[in-house]
């Protein structure tokens, strides 16, 4: 299911088991989502404390697009953005 966020596609959650990490699975899931997206703009987010997921987004062409405070106490949510056709 493609989630919509302000009329844009939104990746709400990417989970890869501990034993399967660092094998390109998260990138493959994100790529598939991007291919299936019904909008050109794609957003997602992760906590400031989640450095591995931030690196996944950045390595898949996403850029920082802002922060949301007060979701998790002391751990802001970083919003990421990518255009579907951007590489």
Image: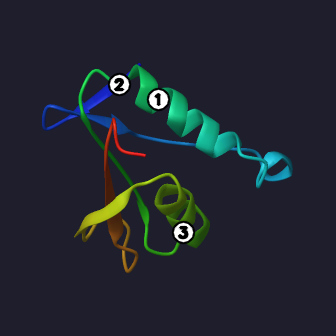
Q: Is residue 17 visible?
A: yes
Report helix, strand or loop for mark 3.
Answer: loop
Select label 3 or label 1 by which is in front.
Answer: 1
Report helix, strand or loop for mark 1.
Answer: helix
Residue at the spot x=52%, y=35% of the render? 31
Q: Position of residue 24 (x, y in %)?
A: 71, 46
Q: Position of residue 48 (x, y in %)?
A: 43, 73
Mark 3 — residue?
50
Q: CA distance from mark 2 to mark 1?
A: 6 Å
Q: Is residue 61 left or right of residue 17?
A: left
Q: Is residue 62 above or below residue 5?
A: below
Q: Position of residue 85 (x, y in %)?
A: 34, 36
Residue at the spot x=58%, y=34% of the render? 29
Q: Is residue 15 visible?
A: no
Q: Is residue 27 above or below residue 78?
A: above
Q: Residues within 10 Å of mark 1 (few under 14, many from 20)?
A: some
Near-viewer residue (48 or 63): 63
Residue 69 image-quadrant placement: bottom left
Mark before the other along the chain sequence, 3 or 2? 2
Q: Is residue 7 left or right of residue 52?
A: left
Mark 1 — residue?
33
């Amino acid at each position: 299911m493609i989630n919509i966020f302000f009329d844009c596609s939104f990746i709400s959650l990417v989970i890869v088991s501990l034993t399967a990490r660092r094998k390109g699975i998260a990138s493959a899931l994100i790529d598939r989502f991007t291919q299936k997206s019904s909008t050109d703009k794609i957003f997602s987010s992760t906590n400031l404390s989640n450095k591995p997921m931030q690196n996944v987004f950045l390595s898949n062409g996403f850029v920082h697009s802002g922060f949301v405070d007060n979701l998790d106490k002391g751990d802001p949510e970083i919003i990421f953005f990518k255009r579907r056709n951007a590489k």
